[in-house]
Image (spheres, helix red, strand yellow):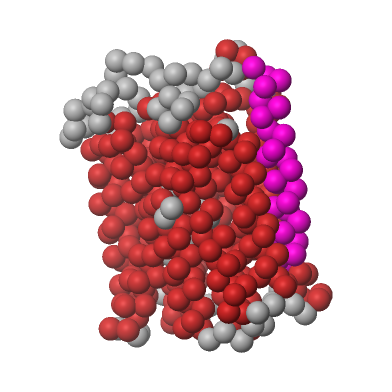
Amino acid sequence: MKTFFKPSSGYYPWLVVFAGLFGVFASIGIGRFALGMLLPSMSNALGLSYSEMGIISTLNFTGYLVAALSSGFIARRTGTRILVFIALLSVGISMSLISLTEGFMFTAVFYTITGLGSGASNVPIMGLVSQWFSRKKRGAAAGFIVTGSGLGVILSGLLVPYFNTINPQKGWRISWLWLGIFVIVIAVLCYLIIRDKPDNSDPASSVLHGNVSNKSILKERLIYYVGIIYFLFGFTYVIYVTFFVTYIVKEWGVTESAAGTLWAWIGVLSLLSGPVFGTLSDKIGRGKGLFLVFLCQSISYFLIATKINYSMIIYVSILLFGLVAWSVPSIMAALMGDILGSEKAAAGFGFITFIFGLGQITGPSVAGFLAEKTGTLSTGFYMATLGASIAMVLSITLREKMASKA
């Protein structure tokens, strides 16, 4: 079966970006970020304990990590188009089946499948930018694609409360079902549009491509350096997104409704993060782009940790965080194309995404442990400040590391 649209060297690369945006919207924005909105009502209905809720989230992350590590290599054999379609289909079906569950076990199983599908679709989608775009445009293309994450946050933030209002007992089931249906529709859209690479041209390869073409990706030392930076991003940003609402409600005295509004604004602001900083990294370099992102994040984390002057500090913190929220994945996707070349970019991105995921698992656990010992979550935000500052230093030296490999 051929794609619905005929590939063209003109508009078609951006049509692939359009499909990729919706693919990320489905796999990450819905498949992962909707859980936080659904857990409260679902846990009450199913009688889930805090530990069971934590296990469900961890299993989803585990599935994502396993798929992220292997999906780039699988995509090189099956093709991105087929893999993304099957992966998104599994996300949509598994989410729809959660709407029918009556207990912990099947919810955990189905949401693990959701995690596997999310990782198996997100990584190849991000790898498409290296196949369809030259080095000078990869950051911009990846930036528009990751906008899908912010759209997913906004959708779940609006849809779930609406269904809970019209049907308090089964609103969470309706939400899972409709979100699953959305993902299935997007899976079909991606299948109709996505092509693995242009038919008649080969995108400009990295200046480093020749150096790694005969090596295993895992033997490329620069990948591990980049992986450390990505780990620090995962470790720090997930502390903010996990504990922001809880922190300002319990320790700042902000009402839950006001905290929800502030969180929604982060979602709105985040829509600009990928395109702006992805494009900026095309102009000034990946290292400098990452430096600016981590500078904004470190200030944001520090301000929220201080608990000084609610009316000003919180707004400045969410502004700085929202403006750069999804920018690092877009820059990293472009960076993998720069380092490894178009053919190996997806596999490389999958590997550093696995390292990034380890940071996401570790961050909340350490922050929660410190909060129990110190009696405040601000300790975790100070730790996030330190981690972002280290990433900032590593990023500014990235250009020298890449130059040494050229």
Question: Where in the figure is residue 239, as x and y percent of width and height?
Answer: 64, 63
**Hey, which quadrant is residue 141 in on the image?**
top left
Left or right position of 292 against 154 = right
Residue ID at (36%, 46%): 21
Residue ID at (58%, 52%): 62
Q: Main secondary structure of the magenta part?
A: helix
Question: Quick check: is 265 in the magenta stretch?
Answer: no
Q: Which residues are magenta?
A: 380-406
**Hey, which quadrant is residue 289 in on the image?**
top right
Residue ID at (72%, 73%): 306
Q: Residue furthest right?
A: 373
Q: Is residue 388 above or below residue 396?
A: below
Judge by depth and name the residue closer to the eye, 181 or 370. 370
Q: Is residue 324 above or below residue 376?
A: above
Quadrant into which the C terminus falls? top right
Examine the rendering and report whether any part of residue 42 can be seen. yes
Judge by depth and name the residue closer to the eye, 328 or 165. 328
Left or right position of 178 against 331 = left
Left or right position of 288 against 91 = right
Quadrant into which the N terminus falls? top left
Residue ID at (60%, 49%): 293
Q: How many marks?
A: 0
Question: Where in the figure is residue 278, as x and y percent of width and height?
Answer: 49, 41
Question: Quick check: is 384 in the magenta stretch?
Answer: yes
Question: Where in the figure is residue 207, as x and y percent of width and height?
Answer: 56, 17
Examine the rendering and report whether any part of residue 117 can be seen. no
Question: Where in the figure is residue 209, as x and y percent of width and height?
Answer: 56, 17
